[in-house]
Image (cartoon, rainbow, N blue to C red):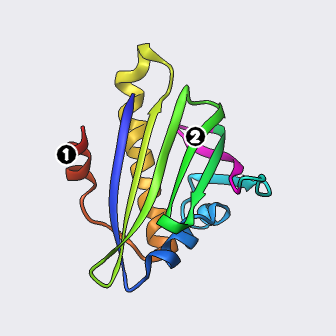
């Protein structure tokens, strides 16, 4: 399974505000053309939501449905694919106070489920995830990635 870890810093914004913005999945297509559509269903009784995603990938579209579980008390959320084009796709977002701003930590683990093409497709998918998350963070919170390559290497 492939892992992505990305750290970004949003200067001058409190963790609660950055968390609120990150949790607004419907706005992601406003900040990256790769996100074609994100639909979020009304909250379930436990407060989680189910969302449907359509994203451009290698000249085609990837689609999946995920469950999003929110923890506003810790400014974190997790997601897990319920169905779709990945064999596995799960991860988390976390917002922490840092130097008058907010450190955002995004993690994801995925498996495209195509072992014969994993060597070719997995690095492309990883790069796409990194680039798209960085664009969304810049757009939503004016956050800049500070050490995604180092963080990924440290957690591998």
Between 137 and 80, the residue placed more toward the observer is: 80
Query: Is residue 89 located in the magenta-colored stretch of the structure?
Result: no
Q: Which mark is residue 8?
A: none
Residue numbers of the magenta segment: 47-62
Number of other residues with Cα within 10 Å of mark 2, as a class: few under 14, some 14 to 19, many 20 or more: many
Between 72 and 58, the residue placed more toward the observer is: 72
SS for callout 1: helix
Query: Is residue 50 located in the magenta-colored stretch of the structure?
Result: yes
Instruction: Measure the alpha-carbon separation of dots 1 and 2.
Output: 23 Å
Q: Position of residue 155 (x, y in %)?
A: 24, 43
Examine the residues drawn in magenta and state their main secondary structure: strand
Q: Residue furthest top?
A: 116
Q: Which mark is residue 80?
A: 2
User: To which residue does mark 1 refer?
Assistant: 154
Visible residue check, residue 61: no
Q: Position of residue 53 (x, y in %)?
A: 66, 47
């Amino acid at each position: 399974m492939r892992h992505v870890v990305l750290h970004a810093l949003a200067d001058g914004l409190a963790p609660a505000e950055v968390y609120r913005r990150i949790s607004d999945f419907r706005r992601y297509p406003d900040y990256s053309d790769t996100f074609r559509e994100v639909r979020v269903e009304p909250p379930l009784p436990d407060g989680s939501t189910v969302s449907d995603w359509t994203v451009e990938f290698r000249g085609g579209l990837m689609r999946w449905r995920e469950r999003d579980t929110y923890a506003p008390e810790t400014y974190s959320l997790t997601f897990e694919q319920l169905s779709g084009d990945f064999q596995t796709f799960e991860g988390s977002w976390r917002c922490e106070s840092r130097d008058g701003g907010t450190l955002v930590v995004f993690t994801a683990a995925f498996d495209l489920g195509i072992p014969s093409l994993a060597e070719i497709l997995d690095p492309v998918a990883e790069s796409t995830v990194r680039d798209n998350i960085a664009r969304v963070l810049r757009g939503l919170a004016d956050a800049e990635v500070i050490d995604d390559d180092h963080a990924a290497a440290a957690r591998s």
